[in-house]
Image (spheres, rainbow, N blue to C red):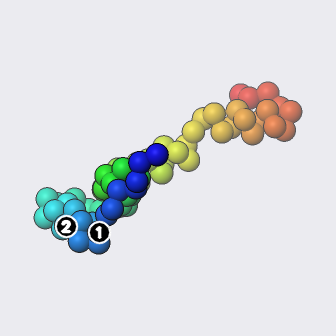
Amino acid sequence: MSARARILQADVTRAVRGARDGGVDIGSIRIMPDGEIVIVSKACAESFRLSATANPLDEVLLHAAQGKTAR
């Protein structure tokens, strides 16, 4: 097993500053185990949240759990 990547606050600050300077409206920041810093724009994060909540399969599963037939 390899050691976790070491990320410094300065690394995150530099990535955030670069994204903001590039015009990105930051929605979230994720630091991956391999040391990759992932910055997600607000528009992309919001789009993901909307698509995650509007999953048609949720209705099918809900009806199945209630013993009903999906429309």
Q: Quadrant of residue 27?
A: bottom left
Pick the residue in front: 49 or 59: 49
Q: Secondary structure at mark 1?
A: loop
Q: Which residue is mark 2?
A: 14
Q: Amino acid at mark 2?
A: Arg
Pointer 1 local density, CA inside 10 Å: few below 14, some 14–19, many at least 20 = few
Q: Residue at x 84, y 38 (%)?
A: 66
**Which percent across, then down, holds residue 18?**
16, 62
Pointer 2 local density, CA inside 10 Å: few below 14, some 14–19, many at least 20 = few
Pick the residue in front: 42 or 9: 9
Q: Amino acid at mark 1?
A: Leu
| Quadrant, the C terminus | top right
Q: Quadrant of residue 65?
A: top right
Q: Residue at x 60, y 35 (%)?
A: 56
Residues at badges 1 and 2 in contact (C-beta under 8 Å)?
no
Q: Which residue is mark 1?
A: 8
Using residue 51 as the reference point, say whether residue 57 is left or right of it: right
Answer above or below: position of 38 versus 7. above
**Is residue 4 at least partly visible in the picture?**
yes
Answer above or below: position of 20 versus 46. below
Pick the residue in front: 56 or 29: 29
**Is residue 43 at least partly visible in the picture?**
no
Q: Secondary structure at mark 2?
A: helix
Answer above or below: position of 47 versus 8. above
